[in-house]
């Protein structure tokens, strides 16, 4: 059964990985993809939309990514993206074990709220052993535990016009020549998927800073760059047009696909 699931992931993820590989190859031959008006980029974006629709059609909204056993965890979880946050705010929280941390959730919701890490830990939890697939070509298997994002959404009650969940994070990145805090997004379908969790432990230990403490999102049906780390707040929106460059996330504004299904 597992082999069949992996095969379907590879088949359906091919178009997304192929398109992303061009933009992420690090080769100067593809620098033109950073131009938001470029015809090739627009073509890749349309292919990404097709991949999104086809995966939803063929697999549905509740298909589960493969899960593994503890015997399959053979190496430490390799960090992806930023591995340290040097801001005064984050350093203060980390030095105190994130006891003063609060996750704020707002935007298009009926009941905006904020949650301490202890409150999130007291909510229903889910543990899953899954494979992290990076667009750079590596993968590792790790055990994650956290609160299902759907449980948090149930607390704040998304409004009918909400379509996307945006993650605002503590780490700073450069975007259009300015320093901004990292941002990413998924749609409500993936947000409510049973395997989408706000992880606070990894391999039975508190989530390390290098892997995104105090919270990172796990979106097991997508590539690793969609799994925002160091989450500061969550915002529900009806459109991604007003989120920085308008493509739904920091990496997407640099040319990555918004939907990275595998």
Image (cartoon, rainbow, N blue to C red):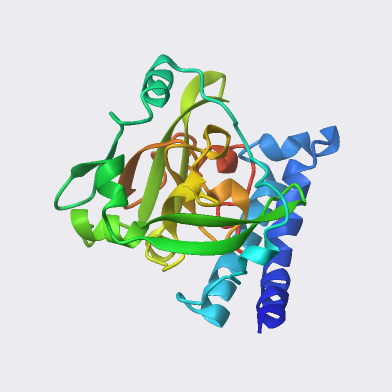
Q: Is residue 6 above or below residue 163?
A: below
Residue 115 coordinates in the image, percent (x, y): 24, 42
Residue under the point 69% across and 64% down: 72
Residue closer to the observer: 61 or 44 = 61
Nearest to the observer: residue 13 or residue 154: 154
Please state, as top left, top right, bottom left or bottom right, where the N terminus lies in the image: bottom right
Name the residue located 41 percent from the left edge and 66 percent from the top edge: 189
Determine whether, in the image, residue 123 is placed left or right of residue 74.
Answer: left
- Image quarter in which the C terminus is found: bottom right
Asked if residue 227 is positioned above or below residue 153 in the image, the reply reads above
- Residue extending farthest to the top is 88
Q: Position of residue 144 (x, y in %)?
A: 51, 55
| The one of 229 and 147 positioned closer to us in this rendering | 147
Q: Residue 2, located in which quarter of the rendered image?
A: bottom right
Q: For residue 170, which quarter of the picture?
A: top left
Measured along the vertical axis of the image, is residue 52 above or below residue 20?
below
Can residue 248 be seen here? Answer: no
Residue found farthest to the bottom: 1
User: How many numbered marks are there?
Assistant: 0
Residue at image coords 45%, 75%? 61
Q: Residue furthest left?
A: 111
Direction from residue 25 to residue 130 in the image, left or right: left
In the displayed structure image, the side of residue 172 where residue 105 appears, left or right: left
Q: Residue at x 46, y 65 (%)?
A: 195
Q: In this rendering, does residue 153 appear at all?
A: yes
Q: Position of residue 136 (x, y in %)?
A: 75, 47
Give the image location of residue 81, x and y in percent.
62, 36
């Amino acid at each position: 059964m597992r082999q069949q699931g992996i095969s379907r992931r590879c088949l359906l993820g091919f178009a997304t990985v192929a398109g992303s590989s061009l933009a992420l190859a690090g080769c100067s031959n593809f620098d033109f993809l950073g131009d938001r008006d470029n015809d090739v980029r627009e073509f890749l974006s349309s292919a990404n939309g097709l991949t999104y629709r086809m995966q939803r059609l063929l697999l549905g909204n509740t298909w589960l990514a493969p899960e593994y056993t503890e015997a399959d965890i053979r190496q430490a979880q390799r960090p992806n993206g930023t591995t340290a946050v040097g801001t005064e705010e984050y350093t203060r929280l980390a030095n105190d074990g994130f006891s003063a941390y609060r996750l704020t959730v707002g935007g298009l919701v009926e009941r905006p709220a904020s949650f301490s890490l202890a409150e999130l830990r007291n909510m229903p939890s889910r543990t899953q052993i899954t494979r992290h697939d990076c667009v750079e070509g590596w993968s590792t298997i790790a055990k994650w535990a956290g609160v299902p994002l759907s449980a948090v959404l149930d607390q704040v009650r998304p409004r009918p016009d909400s379509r996307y969940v945006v993650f605002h994070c503590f780490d700073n990145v450069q975007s259009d020549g300015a320093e901004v805090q990292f941002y990413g997004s998924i749609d409500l379908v993936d947000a409510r998927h049973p395997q989408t969790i706000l992880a606070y432990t990894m391999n039975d230990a508190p989530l390390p800073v290098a892997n995104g403490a105090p919270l990172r999102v796990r979106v097991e049906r997508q590539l690793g760059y969609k799994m925002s780390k160091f989450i500061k707040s969550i915002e529900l929106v009806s459109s991604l047009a007003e989120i920085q460059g308008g493509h739904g996330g920091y990496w997407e504004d640099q040319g990555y696909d918004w939907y990275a299904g595998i």
